[in-house]
Image: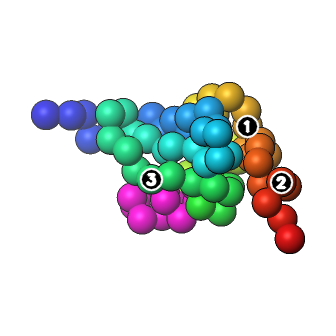
Amino acid sequence: MGNPTQFPHIVVHPPALDGSRRVTEGEVILGIASHLDDVVEILRLADLDRIEVEESDLIEWQGGGPDDWPGLSEHEL
């Protein structure tokens, strides 16, 4: 049984070839994000929407921070 006061450890993984980033909490995949707004929505759906996405110490950004979404500019029309 987990500690109810324990804070979640959210990881936004390094970008895939298409620029998307996997978002996990521990071993659980919460979703795939293609933009910062996707991370916010994924956390909202997981009832973790009280986390300040860009500034929280609860989120580990691997392979770049909240502004790093490679591949997006290549697909703009």
Query: Which mark is nearer the camera, 1 or 3?
Result: 3
Query: Which mark is nearer the camera, 3 or 2?
Result: 2
Real-space CA distance between mark 3 and mark 2, rounded to the nearest whole angstrom: 23 Å
Residue corresponding to mark 1: 65
For label 3, the crowd category at 10 Å Cα-Cα, with few meaning under 14, some 14 to 19 and many 20 or more, is some
Asked if the magenta segment contains residue 48, the reply would be: yes
Residue type pointed to by label 1: Gly
Q: Is residue 40 left or right of residue 8?
A: right
The span picked out in magenta is 39-49
Q: Main secondary structure of the magenta part?
A: helix
Quick one: SS at disc 3?
Answer: strand
Please tell me whether residue 62 is drawn above or below residue 48 in the rendered image. above
Q: Looking at the picture, how far across and down is residue 41, in whole percent?
A: 54, 64
The answer to which of marks 1 and 2 sits earlier in the sequence is 1
Q: Is residue 66 left or right of residue 15?
A: right
The answer to which of marks 3 and 2 sits earlier in the sequence is 3
Residue corresponding to mark 2: 74
Residue corresponding to mark 3: 31
The answer to which of marks 1 and 3 sits earlier in the sequence is 3
Real-space CA distance between mark 1 and mark 3, rounded to the nearest whole angstrom: 17 Å
Task: Evaluate whether residue 57 shows in this view.
Answer: no
**Which residue is nearer to you in this view: 69 or 56?**
69
Q: Pointer 3 and pointer 2: residues touching (CB < 8 Å)?
A: no
Residue type pointed to by label 2: Glu
Real-space CA distance between mark 1 and mark 2, rounded to the nearest whole angstrom: 19 Å
Q: Is residue 55 left or right of residue 7?
A: right
Quick one: SS at disc 2?
Answer: helix
Residue 56 sits in quarter: top right
Residue that appears at 60% across and 39% down: 16
Residue type pointed to by label 3: Gly
Q: Pointer 1 and pointer 2: residues touching (CB < 8 Å)?
A: no
Q: Quadrant of the N terminus?
A: top left
